[in-house]
Image: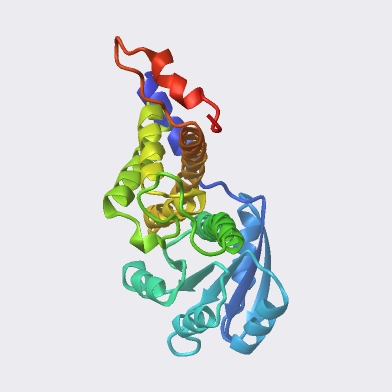
Amino acid sequence: MSIAHSESRVTAAAFRVHLPERMRVLYVTNEQRTGEWLAEAFAVDSASEVMLEEAVGAPAALARLRDEIFDVVLVSHDSDQFDALDFVEGLRAGGSEEPMIVLGHENEQEMLALCYEVGADGYVCVDTSTTRNLIWTSARAIEHHQLIRESRRIVQADRQRLLHEHQETDRLLDQQRSLVEHLDSQIEGEITIPGANCPARKPPDDLPEPLVDRYRQMLRTYVIMGSGDMAEEMKHLAARLVDEGIDARQAMQLHLYVLEELVRGLGNRSARHVLSRGDRLALEVMAYLAEGYRERLLQTLNPPRQRWLPGVDVAACMAPLERPIDE
């Protein structure tokens, strides 16, 4: 046997419908047609154990379906006495989800599409079909509804997961906003950084656009590639922030502004990835920024001295400065 042929058999087996060992069936009919013939037919065919129960008329059927659970509902169709199509359509409109199969004497090609349109799972002509075919039709309808319920459960679970991830993303952003607000509450008035070109307090909207765009490109690259070889670029950015007088609070405002812009419109999973990478970038940039301001402070406290020109007598030049003032 070839591998391809073997794989095709495995795939077919995975999608094969299996007959349930037993089925609890409700047969809905009118007073002119009883279910004795159907019970006898199920008793003869032992492919599956069928526990058949009968409900005469729509009110009795509704009462049984309200109080009990059935694997499948068989509805006898008689256009003059009991219209199964109207009955099934009403049940579906009321939210009933049981598998339903219509039984009748009309031609299957004429009735099958009509049954599908009202929400039935199939149609079986009792004059031309067999009991085994009815059992298999019921089994397929049962499995179809089981798959629908499982799919609905998975969709609901996925929605809950996405909602949880969305809430987690909002919580992380709120924590970072709270950090900036806390820093705002600790600052009073304007603070000027020694050697800076401008005051340190500026709202995010007043940040230089080239600086915002540079950080935006850096964040996008960092999200895709990670830190990689971006150490020098982060050092240059930190030096630019120091030159612009951007402190840690404003750097966080810049980070949040660009980060929220980037995650807007992303799926929850992608947003969490961007947030994770963004936090790492912000941490590294803050470290370089702190080092940049430390170096700027050291330069302010210990400014460089100009060297003497070659050939100058340093002692003779310094002597007048070393004489006592009273002389």
- Judged from this view, the residue extending furthest toward the right is 67
Left or right of 165, for residue 116: left
Instruction: Give the residue displayed 34% in from the left and 47% down from the top.
Output: 216
Asked whether 296 or 118 is in front, the reply is 296
**Quadrant for the N terminus in the image:** top left
Asked whether 11 or 155 is in front, the reply is 155
Instruction: Give the residue displayed 47% in from the left and 26% down from the top.
Output: 321
x and y, in percent, of residue 13 in the image: 49, 37
Say above or below: 201 vs 314.
below
Asked whether 294 or 89 is in front, the reply is 294
Left or right of 62, for residue 194: left
- Coloring applied to the structure: rainbow
Asked whether 183 or 153 is in front, the reply is 183
Q: Is residue 56 visible?
A: yes
Say above or below: 86 vs 126.
below
x and y, in percent, of residue 36 in the image: 64, 72
- Judged from this view, the residue extending furthest toward the left is 210
Instruction: Give the residue displayed 36% in from the left and 73% down from the top.
Output: 111
- Judged from this view, the residue extending furthest toward the front is 327
Left or right of 233, for residue 279: right
Instruction: Give the residue displayed 58% in from the left and 57% down from the top.
Output: 183
x and y, in percent, of residue 238 in the image: 41, 39
x and y, in percent, of residue 300 in the image: 47, 37
Q: How many marks?
A: 0
Q: Is residue 154 visible?
A: no
Say above or below: 48 vs 103.
above
Say above or below: 219 vs 234.
below
